[in-house]
Image: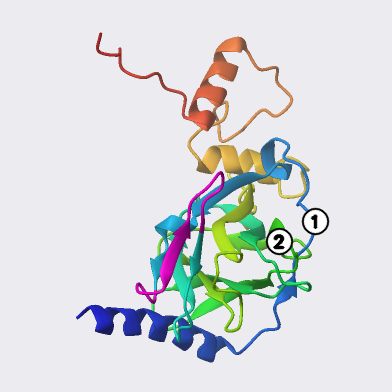
Amino acid sequence: MKVEFRYTALAVVGMIASVLGAQTPVRGSPVPPPAAFGTTGYSVTSVSAFSFTSQDTQADRILLGANSYRYFAAASSDFEFLGGVSIPAGVVIDYVGLNNCDPAAAGGSFLFNFVDGTTGTSGTIVTQVESSHNSCEVDYNTTALNYPYPKNAGHNLQIAVQQVPGAPTDGTAGVQSVEVWWRREVSPAPATQDFGDVPPSSLQFQFVEALFQSGITAGCGGSNFCPDDPVTRGQMAVFLAKALGLNWPETPVP
């Protein structure tokens, strides 16, 4: 049963790759832009290599130290770690990074596949990244992916890290984690307006509709939003509390 499960996991990844066709992996790049706030800022989800599934448990090893790394310590036909990552819906994925140690002069000891698996038998290979540093670094895709991830239902983000055959098996080459850099976005504007005084031609149309569709505001009455009216402190409190989902924790137990 254990061997059958491992084979099935590899078969799924192979099926996805065969359906979508092979891609040429990109080499590592500099660190992505610094984080900011709002729709232009990045949040980073990091997945430890220790949470991955090893395809060859006999050769799978962990190098302990200040920064623990995972690696294969013997030649194997299953040089692969498989895992998943969870991020919020309604975001755009721009960068994925592989935190690894690669002693090869030109890199290339690891190949990282980031896949958006969808319900059914196919998915999307978002990007492939190849390690390129002869040191311990994080290798990212070279340009922003601008990959929309509108919902979690019917989707599952998959990670497949391959230790390329021929890579060192003495612990000098290892994987520590995978990073996913994503940013939030405002939902696209609908085809029709919900407020008579905020037509599609308005620069605020998309954002007003986002507030309405999210249940943050119902307007000022009479099917209007009153975009030019001042906002009271009370109204601002409603907007912020609903938009941010503000709450307070229960009183801690002494």
Q: Is residue 206 visible?
A: yes
Q: Residue 30, which numbered label? A: 1
Between disc 1 and disc 2, whose residue precedes?
1
Q: Residue at x 48, y 72 (%)?
A: 73
Q: Main secondary structure of the magenta part?
A: loop
Q: How is the image coloured?
A: rainbow
Residue 213 within the magenta-colored segment of the rendering? no
Q: Residue furthest top?
A: 254
* Residue 101 picture location, percent across and down: 64, 61
Q: Are marks 1 and 2 in contact (CB under 8 Å)?
A: yes
Which residue is nearer to you in this view: 79 or 222?
79
Q: Is residue 192 visible?
A: no
Question: At label 1, which amino acid type do we have?
Answer: Pro
State the residue in front, 55 or 93.
55
In this rendering, would 188 be left or right of 245? right
Residue at position x 60%, y 74% in the image: 168
Residue 9 place in picture, x, y as percent? 37, 79
Q: On the rendered structure, is 160 left or right of 139? A: left
Foreground of the two, 184 or 142? 142
Q: CA distance from mark 1 to mark 2?
A: 7 Å
Question: Picture quarter containing residue 7?
Answer: bottom left
Q: Residue 211, position in %: x, y? A: 57, 37
- The residue at 61%/33% (across/down) is 224
Q: Classify residue 172 as left or right of residue 151.
A: right
Q: Which residue is mark 2?
A: 140
* Residue 200 tag number: none
Q: Quadrant of residue 66?
A: top right
Image height of 226 relative to 59, above or below: above
User: Mark 2: which amino acid?
Assistant: Tyr
Range of residues picked out in magenta: 55-69
Q: Position of residue 222 (x, y in %)?
A: 55, 31
Quadrant assignment for the C terminus: top left
